[in-house]
Amino acid sequence: MTDHVARVVNQWKSEYSEVDASPMYVLARMMRLSTQINKTLSANFGKFGLATGDFDVLATLRRSGTPYALRPTELTRSSMLTSGTMTSRLDKLERLGLVRREANPNDRRALMIHLTDAGRTLVEKVAGKHFELEAEMLKALSPEDREALAGILERWSHKLETDGTM
Amino acid sequence: MTDHVARVVNQWKSEYSEVDASPMYVLARMMRLSTQINKTLSANFGKFGLATGDFDVLATLRRSGTPYALRPTELTRSSMLTSGTMTSRLDKLERLGLVRREANPNDRRALMIHLTDAGRTLVEKVAGKHFELEAEMLKALSPEDREALAGILERWSHKLETDGTM
DNA sequence: GTCAAGTATCTTGATATCAAGTAATTCATC
DNA sequence: GATGAATTACTTGATATCAAGATACTTGAC
């Protein structure tokens, strides 16, 4: 049983053995799978007129609970983006009437981004379909593999978030 | 032990239990880790004046063995990109003198992309550092987790490449 | 041989992202 | 309280990517 990455590692071995390409068994596989997963998810968001990142913002607001409002900085951190990117995402979402920028009463440098009623209705509809699709994708894994994978990735993420390495 | 994704799944559960966000334990973790890994790797490529995708093209040519030449379509498929994106990557790499477009003797619609001597020298230098960095990143995982992870991801990739699902 | 269908590369226009820098505000230290 | 450092959101200019379409060539069915 081989996949694309296994073939690539073998090529490196026979064509340029000065390097050890074996880390690709983990890293390249993860990155290729992520790319494909992203494409599938983004096709679903597209049906609702959203890009992946738009959903990410709306979902972060929705799951934060009432009053469904966060500062741009919190949204930026949660999404692993730069502040400029978040500004343009918010511009778009505001134009679509899904969020509203309001003054932040506690800090005049800051804003509060509010989910509008339309935004809330939309994100709930999209989220239902989104998580169904994610569950569907995971059916390619055995229950044991899925369980093991979640555990390994949790340990890895936790370590990175703690150490701050990488 | 919790990570960002565990907190997010809990938020969904308490704020909108109509959805089951548990697929995120696998999918969101993988995507977040990939994003971080990409940033780290791309910082290394940047030291050599390359973007991640540029290295990808050069590396694909190098590991294909002599005469270090492939058609644009092969490079496009291997990188999971559109043909337009590959065109502009090749424009850039040609401008840098790292690859050369030549006519394809077997198919006048097609070209052959040749790695130049400068391209070969550069990609070998970058690859050395690149794989060292990847090995370093994997030290965050125990040897058992690393082994298990590679196996699970291989089964998953293989299934996707075979089924064509997703 | 002819021609329809498929393939290969490139072009165009739109969007998403980043890095670097700006202006307003808050915080911390003296 | 005054002031320098940090923080917040935004702006700008550059690049990477995609989807859709254009053009040239090849393949296969007849």
Image (cartoon, coloured by chain):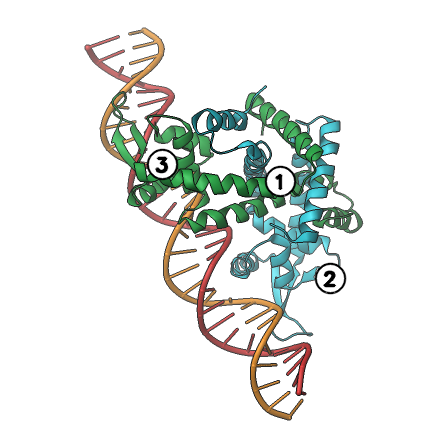
Chain colours: A green, B cyan, C orange, D red
Q: Nearer the viewer, residue B159 or B3?
A: B159
Label of residue B67 in the image:
2
Q: Nearer the viewer, residue A156 or B73?
A: A156
Left or right for B88, reference A117: right
| Residue mark closest to the camera, 1 vs 2 | 1
Label of residue A138 in the image:
1
10 Å crowding of disc 1: few (<14), some (14-19), many (20+): some
Chain letter for the residue marked with disc 1 in the picture? A
* Numbered disc total: 3
Query: What residue is shown at x 31% (from left), y 42% (from top)?
Result: A91
10 Å crowding of disc 3: few (<14), some (14-19), many (20+): some
Q: Quadrant of residue C30?
A: top left
Q: CA distance from mark 1 to mark 2?
A: 41 Å
Left or right for A104, reference B113: left
Chain letter for the residue marked with disc 3 in the picture? A
**Mark 2 secondary-structure assignment:** loop
Nearer the N terminus, badge 1 or badge 3? 3
10 Å crowding of disc 2: few (<14), some (14-19), many (20+): few
